[in-house]
Image (cartoon, rainbow, N blue to C red):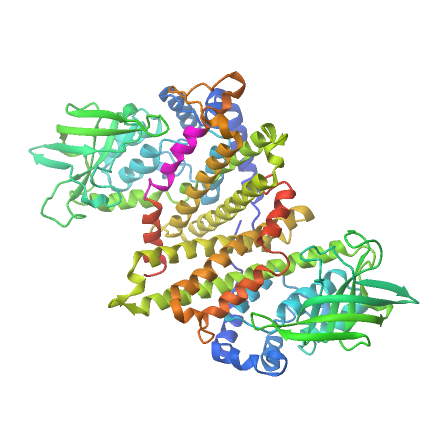
Amino acid sequence: MDLAFTKEEIAFREEVREFFKNNVPPETRRKLQEGRHLSKDEMVTWWRILNKKGWGVTHWPKEYGGTGWTTVQHYIFNEELQSYPAPQPLAFGVSMVGPVIYTFGNEKQKKEYLPRIANVDDWWCQGFSEPGSGSDLASLKTTAERRGDKWIINGQKTWTTLAQHADMIFCLCRTDKNAKKQMGISFIVFSMKSKGVTVRPIQTIDGGHEVNEVFFDDVEVPYENLIGEENKGWDYAKFLLGNERTGIARVGVSKERLRRIRALASKVESGGRPVIEDPAFREKLTACEIELKALELTQLRVVADEGKHGKGKPNPASSVLKIKGSEIQQTTTELLMEIIGPFAAPYDEHGDAGSNESMDWTAQIAPSYFNNRKVSIYGGSNEIQRNIISKAVLGL
Amino acid sequence: MDFDLSEEQRLLKESIDGLLTDAYDFDARKKYMKEKGGWSKALWGKLAEQGLLGLPFAETDGGFGAGAVETMIVMEALGKALVVEPYLATVVVAGGFLRRGGSAEQKAKHIPGIIDGSKTFGFAQLEKNSRYDLFDVVTTAKKKGDGWVIDGEKFVVLNGENADTLVVTARTKGGQRDKTGIGVFLVPADAKGVTKKGYPTQDGLHAADITFTNVEVGADAAIGDPENGLPLIERVADEARTALCAEAVGAMDESLKETVEYIKTRKQFGVAIGSFQSLQHRAADMFVALEQARSMSMFATMASDFSDAKERSSAVAAAKVQVGKSLKFVGQQSIQLHGGIGMTMEAKIGHYFKRLTMIENTLGDTDYHLRRVSEGGGLLA
């Protein structure tokens, strides 16, 4: 047992840090630090910088543009990316549909889609959840009916993150109404510009517009846009959801936030002294740092295990990472709220200015607190994660 | 970065797990606890035979030169089996003082008796008002001729009832809470002026309250620098805390297993109660708590090699915080999920709860260590 990184790993970390320092646009970094939303341009610009460096799709197989890094290198890269902070690659393309296409797609599909995902020539979104199908995803009702060399798609998806920017969608559609619910689903990709696709924004409690409803009204899609086999879509969805295992803890994100909390708590005064000098506050912060250290090590154990024994089935330990990671992220936003106290109140509809110049940095703290309630709901709610642990780990 | 055990470490784990599976089921434990002193000399002899009592000592001292990982392996196994024999006090604590502070003569005099299992040690540190501050010492050691005279009272001395020799912290200079002027002394338990009141502790171990009245010991009683012993005491206490974390992980691991097994078999309303989601989620949360504790136990273990003393002690304190939180949750919920049967002395599960509870209050509880980390500037730095 040895906790230390090797010399090579430390050198790699330096290389990554140096690259971020020299290449992440400062304005992008500042906005992330302050919990602001980035514009589409800001994100795409950064992703293309990453892709040019060859780091756009790091974990893909080398033949499709991946890096061939070790699991530890991937860990270091993600950790540094999150804690710098710089925008993470667009998960829907890079972590979700990309691996499904290079694993289950045909040659034509690989050639057509993969390079465009890597360079974000296409912005992808995910068509999974429906109004009646949240945790019980397999009950989904959107249909794809085969008509000659076309699919005719009808139905509604929801919680579609950043669909307002999207060029493409990967969609779970019911293709066999008579099969058992998991068996009759297919994985189909198509253009968001297709006739019959309507995107309607959903405003979330923080006032932001991240998610959307997407309606399909007799949308015509070429038959060849089916990925893999007909009615096997549920298997691909499970593959996709189990694929992003260790990034889910978002240790780097929480680390960056805890650093920010220490800095802000040293600046803001309460009771005639900086908030950080209040023992009660400081102990809450320390408790959170300890939880995060434990989570980081749990994550490293999973990473090391995957490095040694290969990525087989989804590791149920990733449910621990999801539960703890989301709880800690939420705690960090609570601590930020505590620091600013009454100054959390002013609401700025456009989300880009504080109540006044000197308190500019407070603008996004309450919205970010409200917004972060989502992290224990999305990606399989924490209750679903507990179901997974109790079944897959404890055998209950 | 590597979390796997080496081949030798794996063999060590198999060997101690095997030994305890054979010799330390719940009934055997009850039998051992009824023996004189409350623990089994025969079992202790078996640990000695397998070399487990000599693990951390240097080969030149007759040991195996093993490190913190090996101690973690052993402590985890002892925790799983709820072993009541005085491994912590003798091998980890007294052994630690001898290894890190003992002179060649002291090592030669005391280590062989630990390794062959013929001698056990007690740790006389806690005082009436010291609580968890290792530097808060009223007991005095005054120079007399070449030797020392020790006076004072120590409480809940680990293995105090049965130890052959006591490791005693005592003040050679300064006031109650001064960080200098503290020494560490080896005192034969049968020395003139040592009076002890022994008792079993809540977890089935044995301790004692001990009064030292004009106890005269020789010059060779002092381990390390008698006027500046605190760094040594802190170092050894950190090793003991790390060992306790591992013991707690073993106990939690087994506690969760027992509980899951129980709710799979216990039927109410015609079904196994483990089919109820409220219980499943509780068990899942116990698993999360256990894994977080396991990570921090490993962290503390690996921190023992950190060269920076502050970093090391803050890692150990952080581990004790996480383990303390986890053990409370796992311990309490193990009882809850067992229902009424968990309340009985007859069921094993309550004994895990009791040992876990006592571990939290040994060498600093959760709040104490949280404050230490917090006052030290946090853990991220």
**Residue at the far right in the pictured view:** B145
Q: Seen in the image, is B84 located left or right of residue A173?
A: right
Residue situated in front as seen by the camera: A210 or A39 = A210
Give the residue drawn at x 51%, y 48%: A294
| Residue A86 screen position, x and y as percent | 46, 29
Residue at the (83%, 56%) spot, across then down:
B227
Indicate the quadrant containing the C terminus of chain B: top left, top right, bottom left or bottom right: top right
Q: Quadrant of residue B129?
A: bottom right
Q: Which residues are magenta?
A: A366-380
Q: Which percent across, then down, holds residue A15? A: 54, 32
Q: Nearer the viewer, residue B58 or B291?
A: B291
Asked if residue B37 is positioned above or below residue B333 in the image, the reply reads below
In the rendered structure, the answer to whether residue B10 lies left or right of residue A222 reads right
Query: Which of the pair A172/A267 is nearer the observer?
Result: A267
Main secondary structure of the magenta stretch: helix
Residue A87 seen anywhere in this rendered image of the structure: no
